[in-house]
Image (spheres, helix red, strand yellow):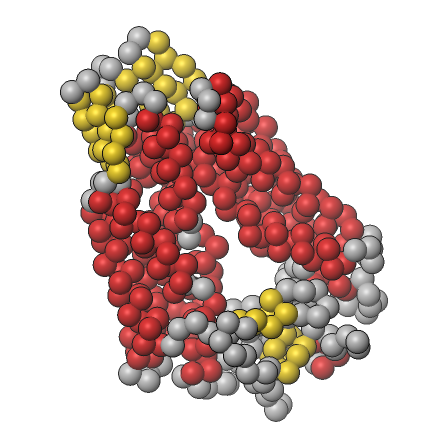
C-alpha cells in the first residue's frame, strides 16, 4: 500500500488548535488565529530541558518526606516509598501496587521513554518508528495519573485535623513530586512526534 | 491561496488524507503511524449543551458539599474539594496547592464555563463573541483537567483512612463521580466539529 503524502509535500501545515490545514507560509492559523509552526519550536531543546529538570526534582521527591502523621502519641514522616511499603505490610497489596505504579513506575517510564525518543530523534534513527510513535502517545495518556499521590495527600491532610488526637500534614517532598509530574507533562507536550518521521526525509529544518 | 477544508492532517506524523464521512462509532486511523486521526462525533450541539448544563449543576454540588466524613472517638470532621486544596497551601509548599487547585477545581470550572458560552451560542446557530479565544483556551485546558485522577485519589484516601477511623463518603463524592463522567464526555475533541458546524470564516 502506498503511503499518504506528507503535509509539507502539499505545502500545508497543521493547526494544533483547530485541526485546519493551513498554508505552509502562514504564521497564524487563518481560522482560529493561533500561531502555527511546521514543527513545534525548539522541540528537542525544550523537551530535554523539562526532562532534566524533572529528573533533578525526582531526587528530593523521593528522599524528602511527603506527609507527616501524628497519631495519638507518636508522630512519623512518610516518604512515597515508605507509604507504599506500609500499605503492603498492612495487607492492602492492591493499593500498594496502584500507588507504586502511579508514583514510581509511571514517572520512571516517562524518563526512559522521553529520553529514548529524544536520542533516537537526534540521531535521525529509522528504527521502529511506528512503535516509537505509539510509545509517545502512551506516555501522553498515562502522564497525569502520577498526580494521584499529591491528591491523596491533599484529601487526607484536609480530613485528619483533630488537634490533640491526630493530624496529618503535607511535607516538602510532595511539592517536588508535584513539580516532577508537571515537568514531565510539559516535557511530553513540547516533544513533537513528527520529528520521529522526519528521519525518513532529509530536508526538514 | 485556495483552501482545502476537506484535508485532514495526522498530528503525530504529518500525513495528509482526504476527509471521509465516518459512520457512528467509527474512527479513522493513520496508516503511517496508527494514531487515531478522527472519530465520528458522539453528540450534536444540543446534546453537548444539555450535558454541559448537567455538568455545571454537578460542579456546584461537588464543590458545595463535603466529599468525605470521618469520625474518631466521638470527634468528626469533613472536607470539601476546596479544603483539600487549602490543606496543601502551607508555607513553602503553597505552589503545589495552585497546581492541585488548577487540576481539580479551576480547569473543570473554566471548561464548563467556556463550553457553556460557546455551545449556548452554537445552540441558536451563532458564533459566540470571543469564540476563537474560548476554543483555544479549551484546547489548552484539556491536559490539566484531572478529575478522574482526583476520584481515584479519594478512593485511595478512603482505604488509607478506613483502617484507623470511620470513613463515609459525602454527597460531594457522588456528584464528583458524575461530574467526572460528564467532563470526559463533553470536553473531548467533539467540540472541534463546531468550527465546521458554524462555518467560522477563514481570513
x, y percentage for residue B29?
63, 70
Judge left or right: residue A121 versus residue A91: right
**Residue shown at the point (33%, 16%) measured from the top left:** A70
Q: Is residue B91 visible?
A: no
x, y percentage for residue A197?
75, 63
Q: Is residue A129 above or below residue B97?
A: below
Closer-to-camera residue (A56/A82): A82
Give the total number of marks visible in the rendering.
Answer: 0
Q: Is residue B12 above or below residue A190?
A: below
As drawn, which residue projects farthest toward the left?
Answer: B74
Closer-to-camera residue (A15/B152): B152
Judge left or right: residue B1 versus residue B55: right
Task: Tell me the quarter of the image containing the N terminus of chain B.
Answer: bottom right
**Residue shown at the point (61%, 52%) measured from the top left:** A138
Closer-to-camera residue (A172/A181): A181
Closer-to-camera residue (A121/A204): A121
As drawn, which residue projects farthest toward the bottom?
Answer: B2
**Residue shown at the point (80%, 62%) measured from the top left:** A199
Judge left or right: residue A164 versus residue A108: left
x, y percentage for residue A19?
55, 73
Residue B42 is drawn in which quadrant?
Answer: bottom left
**Residue shown at the point (68%, 77%) measured from the top left:** B16
Residue B55 is drawn in which quadrant?
Answer: bottom left
Q: Is residue B2 visible?
A: yes
x, y percentage for residue B147?
39, 49
Q: Is residue A7 above or below residue A97?
A: below
As drawn, which residue projects farthest toward the top?
Answer: A73
Amino acid at each position: 500500500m502506498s503511503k499518504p503524502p506528507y503535509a509539507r509535500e502539499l505545502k500545508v501545515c497543521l493547526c494544533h488548535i483547530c485541526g485546519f490545514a493551513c498554508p505552509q507560509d502562514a504564521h497564524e492559523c487563518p481560522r482560529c488565529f493561533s500561531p502555527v509552526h511546521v514543527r513545534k519550536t525548539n522541540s528537542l531543546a525544550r523537551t530535554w530541558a523539562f526532562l532534566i529538570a524533572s529528573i533533578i526534582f525526582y531526587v528530593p521527591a523521593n528522599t524528602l518526606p511527603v506527609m507527616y502523621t501524628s497519631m495519638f502519641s507518636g508522630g512519623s514522616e512518610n516518604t512515597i516509598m515508605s507509604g507504599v511499603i506500609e500499605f503492603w505490610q498492612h495487607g492492602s497489596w492492591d493499593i500498594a501496587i496502584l500507588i507504586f505504579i502511579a508514583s514510581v513506575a509511571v514517572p520512571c517510564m516517562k524518563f526512559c521513554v522521553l529520553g529514548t525518543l529524544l536520542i533516537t530523534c537526534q540521531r535521525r534513527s529509522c528504527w521502529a518508528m511506528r512503535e516509537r510513535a505509539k510509545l509517545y502517545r502512551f506516555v501522553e495518556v498515562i502522564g497525569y495519573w502520577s498526580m494521584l499521590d499529591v491528591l491523596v495527600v491533599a484529601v487526607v491532610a484536609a480530613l485528619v485535623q483533630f488537634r490533640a488526637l491526630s493530624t496529618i500534614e503535607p511535607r516538602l517532598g510532595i511539592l517536588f513530586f508535584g513539580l516532577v509530574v508537571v515537568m514531565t507533562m510539559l516535557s511530553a507536550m513540547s516533544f513533537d512526534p513528527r520529528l520521529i518521521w522526519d528521519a525518513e526525509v532529509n530536508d526538514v529544518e | 491561496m485556495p483552501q482545502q477544508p476537506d484535508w485532514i492532517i495526522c498530528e503525530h506524523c504529518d500525513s495528509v488524507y482526504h476527509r471521509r464521512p465516518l459512520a457512528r462509532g467509527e474512527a479513522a486511523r493513520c496508516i503511517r503511524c496508527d494514531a487515531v486521526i478522527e472519530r465520528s462525533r458522539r453528540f450534536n450541539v444540543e446534546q453537548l449543551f444539555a450535558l454541559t448544563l448537567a455538568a455545571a449543576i454537578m460542579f456546584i454540588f461537588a464543590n458545595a458539599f463535603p466529599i468525605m466524613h470521618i469520625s474518631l472517638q466521638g470527634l468528626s470532621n469533613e472536607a470539601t474539594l476546596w479544603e483539600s486544596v487549602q490543606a496543601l497551601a502551607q508555607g513553602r509548599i503553597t505552589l503545589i496547592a495552585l497546581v492541585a487547585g488548577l487540576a481539580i477545581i479551576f480547569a473543570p470550572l473554566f471548561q464548563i464555563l467556556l463550553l457553556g458560552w460557546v455551545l449556548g451560542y452554537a445552540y441558536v446557530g451563532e458564533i459566540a463573541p470571543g469564540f476563537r479565544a474560548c476554543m483555544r483556551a479549551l484546547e489548552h485546558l484539556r491536559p490539566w483537567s484531572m478529575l478522574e485522577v482526583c476520584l481515584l485519589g479519594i478512593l485511595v484516601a478512603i482505604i488509607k483512612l478506613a483502617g484507623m477511623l470511620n470513613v463515609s463518603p459525602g454527597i460531594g463524592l457522588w456528584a464528583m463521580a458524575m461530574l467526572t463522567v460528564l467532563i470526559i464526555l463533553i470536553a473531548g475533541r467533539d467540540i472541534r466539529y463546531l468550527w465546521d458546524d458554524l462555518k467560522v470564516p477563514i481570513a
